[in-house]
Image (cartoon, rainbow, N blue to C red):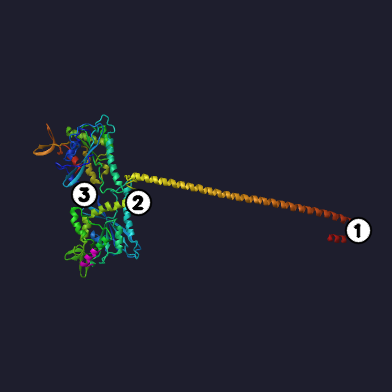
Amino acid sequence: GQSGLGKSTMVNTLFKSKVSRKASQPGQEERIPKTVELQSVTHVIEEKGVKMKLTVTDTPGFGDQINNENCWDPIIKYINEQYERYLREEILITRKRKIPDTRVHGCVYFVPPTGHWLRPLDLEFMRRLSKIVNVVPVIAKADTLTLEERAEFKQRIQEDLKTHAISVYPQEDFDQDPDDRALNDRIREKIPFAVVGADQEHQVNGKRVLGRKTKWGIIEVENPAHCEFPLLRDLLIR
Amino acid sequence: QNDGFRTLSLSGHVGFGSLPDQLVKKSIKQGFCFNILCIGETGSGKSSLINSLFNTNFDDPESTHFLPSVQLRARTYELQESNVLLKLTIVNTVGFGDQINREDSYQPIVDYIDAQFEAYLQEELKIKRSLCSYHDTRIHVCLYFISPTGHSLKTLDLLTMKSLDSKVNIIPIIGKADGISKTELQNFKNKIMCELVSNGVHIYQFPTDDETVSEINTIMNGHLPFAVVGSTKEVKIGNKTVRGRQYPWGIVQVENENHCDFVKLRNMLICTNMEDLREQTHARHYELYRRCRLEEMGFRDIGPQNKPVSLQASYEAKRHELYLELQRKEEEMRQQFVHRVKEKEAMLKEAEQQVQTKFEHHMLMHQEVKLQLEKNKKILEDEIAVFYEKKANAELLQSQASVSTPVVSLKRDKDRK
């Protein structure tokens, strides 16, 4: 997603830890690069004895230039490179017991909260990438939309995706049995999730919650009535 | 990309601690498969043991002792416990050890195991492959039944196990162990383990690197080979019905740990180490087979200058090699063809030459004969001319004489003439 849509904050909120690129390279000047770059940071996190190696890849410069033609090419190239690397390991005669897996498991695409339709850039990108990776579109900075505007925006996006035959995660083709399909249909009704990210805690009703403080109230990130961040977290992690 | 991974601590509950549960759910849905190979002489108790292990009657008919060669019979069953589905394949060696000449007894077994590896390799090498739905028939464990002689291993046992130990996980078992007494049993076990070690046979060792199971596995490793008794019949003891064998002198209970090692075998094989057996088969035995096979086919990881070579490069190199070979063969054939044509031409020319000479010779003969005939003809013509002259003279004389002499005397003269 474009810069300024809250990607780093979102990823920090998801993993309750400073996993974003900005957080791991403090002091670097914020500049918009002239071409799309891909920067990956890998972390090791542990919960309840389960260790996970989490790699977060960011795309600074995406959609930021005046002419954004083919800005998805470096991204597609990166994803295919990971597949190539894995394939090369798999094809060896003497291959490793555990092949190191750097393949991209999920791609979260941040749609700006215009409230209208998907932009041509969004459509082009998602059309190309949904063929090679699991794409999860989210409406970023959703605290600028009211609930009705949100519902309408979602409806329009779903129509757009269907018209252009873009299959986002969870893809209908991969439904394995009726139970799976029922579960995934419920998710598909709500896509794209309208999310708000926050990494600061505030006091609400005596509890400490993650949220954004504004003059007219506190937006609680983990409150399903306020935003759909919990749904995104459940889909991606739990 | 950062190569040093940072370790971060979480400030709240994220939820990926449920990853193992997600895996479990998926695995249960997919179901598992497990393949057992039983090797043992006919009547060593294989079917009874399998029936007892899985608490079912697998309906395997008894086989005769008179099969001419060893055959492998595989049967697949679908079992369910709780909500876990298991596709169990049991492969029996029929006729093992029955022949008088047993030199070829173990080869069919080795071939069978290799064939399963080959089938998996072929599936893995396909372009459009379906490994998730592939029915894995590779043998995960081989239960080798040792006859309860009480002395030592037979040569056939050693040979067979040696030929299989790098291809499959072997667990040696003493079948029909109710014929051996407790003291004899320990000696027998020790003897067997010594012989296996001294002959360099690698049997399956229960894994001891995972702390949760290392203790129990180490103890069990010391009890190998398991002395088991199997039974398909149930007997009444007190008010319980258990699997057992009824003798006049008592009842051998299959599940009584004092009577035999059946419970140990079941726990080790199914409860504790089934997954390790499957993993060892895939990660060790299958990888070895795959490596040997690919090297056989001419593929290498490292090229001639010790640089890594990709599979694609190997393919290209091989294809180029074969292409050059093809060209060479073509050239050879072409040359041979030209050579043969030349030979044939020379032959024909010679024959033509011969025919020509004969013809000329005949022509000459013909000429000579013709000349000769002409000569003869001339001579004859001359003779004819002389004859006519004489005839004319004679007629003249006759006409002169007819005036003065009778006809008779003339006749006489004529006859005389």
> Is residue B218 shown to the viewer in this render?
yes
Give B83 or B332, whichever is nearer the viewer.
B332
Query: What amino acid is found at the position of numbered circle 3 in the picture?
Result: Val
- Are the residues flagged by discs 1 and 2 from a single subunit? yes
How far apart are the two marked residues, 3 and 2, measured between alpha carbons? 39 Å
Query: Residue A167's x, y, as percent?
Result: 26, 39
Which quadrant is home to the C terminus of chain A? top left
The residue pinned by badge 1 equals B404
Contact between labelled residues 3 and 1, with CB atoms less than 8 Å apart? no
Queried whether the magenta region covers residue B182, the answer comes back as: yes
Amino acid type for the residue under numbered disc 1: Ser
Q: Are marks 3 and 2 on the same chain?
A: yes
Indicate whether A236 appears above or below B371.
Answer: above
Q: Which residues are magenta?
A: B180-191
Nearer mark to the viewer, of 1 and 2:
2
Q: Is residue B101 one of those drawn in magenta?
A: no
Dot 1 lies on which element?
A: loop
What SS does tag 2 mark? helix
User: Do the residues at discs 1 and 3 belong to one chain?
Assistant: yes
The mark that comes first in sequence, 1 or 2, is 2
Where residue A107 is drawn, which disc sits there?
A: none
- Return the residue at label 2: B296
Q: Which residue is mark 3?
A: B24
Foreground: A21 or B364? B364
